[in-house]
Image (spheres, rainbow, N blue to C red):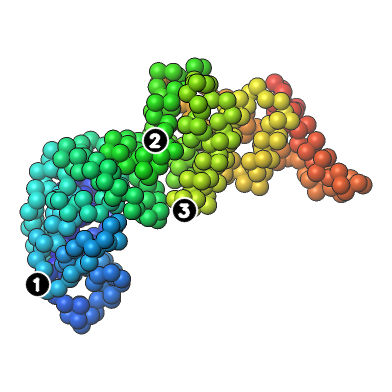
Amino acid sequence: MKTYVVGGAVRDRLLGLPVQDRDHVVVGATPEEMLARGFRPVGRDFPVFLHPETQEEYALARTERKSAPGYRGFVFHAAADVTLEQDLARRDLTINAIAEDESGALVDPFGGRADLAARRLRHVGPAFAEDPVRVLRVARFAARFADFAVAEETLALMRAMSDSGEVDHLVPERVWQELARGLMEARPSRMIALLRECGALARILPELDRLFGVPQPAEHHPEIDTGVHVLRALDLAAARHHGLPVRYAVLLHDLGKGQTPPAEWPRHHGHEAAGAALAAAVSARLRAPTDCRDLAVLTAREHGLVHDAAALRPATLADLLMRADALRRPRRFGQLLEACECDFRGRPGWEERPWPAGDLLRRALRAAQGVDAGVIAAATADKARIAERVREARVAAVRQALRPDGEAS
């Protein structure tokens, strides 16, 4: 029985990066031997065990055989006669197929160290094409390792997997899992761009794919199309270390522009309502978490008004706050403003432009929060008019706060 550290822990150590989790592969052992040594079984589809002290994962060396379409269509074989090289051969990328034995010696049968040095993402072998999740994983690694290029032969294989319909077998949970992890990487735009380049984006997120080639409104930045703008805004959200809900909202905020008939370009009148409906539909299909879905729908629906805040009447601003549920959920409203600012600055030369909408709307929210609805309700004889009176008070408070001397009065 021999144990090896494998995968990301070895890769990241060789890159000089912090090692988060250590996975192990065990060669020459049976499940019974693992149990006898105190390991606790956790694997459903194949034997994986937790170390009795470190709680790190130890998986028996295994091979896999394609038995049906999709990432679940595999038959696994784990036995004491499976070699380390056979186990490494089933992995996705060469940089993830390096093992380290207990003495620190490396086992690298597929040239992973050379690909690390060359800053190259290259698949291990033809079995790569059997698992559509690997298309998403390569795209995610492209977002994480921004200075790595995808090998031409790997990109060609990813295109073939898209063209053949293999990626159509991806289940929503795995798409969301990989998408969410990729959005949280340093350069999430590279994930989307690579998925588009290999044809997978049109199958996984066709609503987003349609934005490429759709021009921006003339008053924005006609030199870049809507898809490129979204990717710039997404990378800005990453650079500002915004959370997943904000990054996801930025990704989907302009989906409505893909519905505009080409005859109306570059105008996109009313795209916000269409975009909100699409953001809701995409989120339902991906089974996105509630916080991500709600912020994406809110941002798609309201980002136009947010940008126009300085030109809006106090009543319209107060209604925006209430429609966004900002008084009950101020943190989410702050996330809306974060997403909208990334949208605003996601154009060449706009990164340092003043964006007064954020400060203005925060002042408006503070003013509306200062209205005591309970006092108004108690003082209103006609209870049917309470909501109307509260709204009037909030509009008045917003109007006062936004006067040039509003905060001093």
The disc, 1 or 3, on the residue closer to the chain's N-terminal end is 1
Point out residue 263 in the picture as x, y percentages from the top left corner.
50, 21
Instruction: Name the residue tied to disc 3.
Output: 287
Quarter of image, res 369: top right
Crowd around label 3: few <14 · some 14–19 · many ≥20 (10 Å): some
Point out residue 248 in the picture as x, y percentages from the top left corner.
45, 42
Marks 1 and 2 sit apart, C-alpha to C-alpha, by 46 Å
Q: Is residue 67 above or below residue 322?
A: below
Q: Is residue 157 above or below residue 310?
A: below
| Left or right of 23, for residue 377 | right
Front-lying residue, 297 or 75: 75
Crowd around label 2: few <14 · some 14–19 · many ≥20 (10 Å): many
Quarter of image, res 270: top right
Front-lying residue, 239 or 408: 239
Q: Secondary structure at mark 2?
A: helix
Marks 1 and 3 sit apart, C-alpha to C-alpha, by 40 Å
Q: Is residue 288 visible in the rendered structure shown here? A: no
| Left or right of 13, for residue 165 | right
The nearer-to-camera label among 1 and 2 is 2
Residue 209, numbered circle: 2
Q: What amino acid is found at the position of numbered circle 1 in the picture? A: Asp
Quarter of image, res 192: top left
Q: Residue at x 66, y 35 (%)?
A: 320
Q: Quick one: quadrant of the N terminus?
A: bottom left
Q: Is residue 59 above or below residue 303?
A: below
The disc, 1 or 2, on the residue closer to the chain's N-terminal end is 1
The disc, 3 or 2, on the residue closer to the chain's N-terminal end is 2
Q: Secondary structure at mark 1?
A: loop
Q: Quick one: quadrant of the C terminus?
A: top right
Q: Residue at x 28, y 76 (%)?
A: 40
Instruction: Name the residue tied to disc 1.
Output: 81
